Amino acid sequence: MGDGIARLTFIFLAFSPGMFFAAPTFLPSTFTMTLLMLSFAEWFDCKYAKALTAGAVAVLLSCWPYVGVAFVPCGLEALVRRPPLRVIAGCLALVLLLLAPIVAMDSYFYGSPTLSSWNLVAYNVLHDRSHLYGVEGWQY
């Protein structure tokens, strides 16, 4: 089993430019990269709960919500190999447990109820304003 995991890890790393660029950068990328590798290690060992926990922490705490796409295959396999209602209930409980302090801190520091990860996705994806980087005023 170890050789197979090593080969899969090599393939993921060799064809993932994000991992190459994230390795020497600062906290959000490195934190997410470390949790992604932890998640993959647990996933390859069929420990889906630990893998999805690492994924949820990476997505919600790193302020880099786009990495959630990397955890979709693990979640789908967990739904196939474990009781689906148990997987869904566990994921919902985990997300609520993680979101409560995140929303509390974001709301405290921003002065109104908010979730900064959602604001990032809404601004860049839903409102298609990513072309405005560097030109928004200081008050944004």
Image: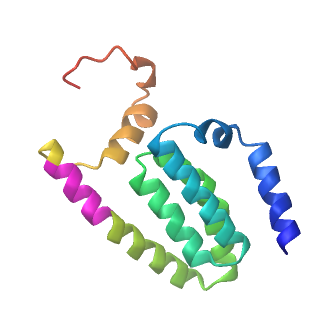
Would you place residue 125 above or below residue 64 in this image?
above
Side (left or right) of 69 relative to 17: left
Q: Which residues are magenta?
A: 99-108
Q: How many marks?
A: 0
For the stretch drawn in magenta, the main secondary structure is helix
- Residue 80 is covered by the magenta coloring: no
Spot occupied by residue 17 in the image (x, y as percentages of width and height): 70, 37
Would you place residue 129 above or below residue 56 in this image?
above
Side (left or right) of 85 relative to 6: left
The foreground one among 19 and 88 is 19
Which residue is drawn at the image coordinates 47% and 54% (left, top)?
A: 59
Which residue is drawn at the image coordinates 50% and 76% (left, top)?
A: 88
Residue 114 in view: yes
Q: Quadrant of the C terminus?
A: top left
Spot occupied by residue 86 in the image (x, y as percentages of width and height): 52, 84
Spot occupied by residue 57 in the image (x, y as percentages of width and height): 45, 61
Residue 113 in view: no
Which quarter of the figure has residue 50? bottom right
Which quarter of the figure has residue 2? bottom right
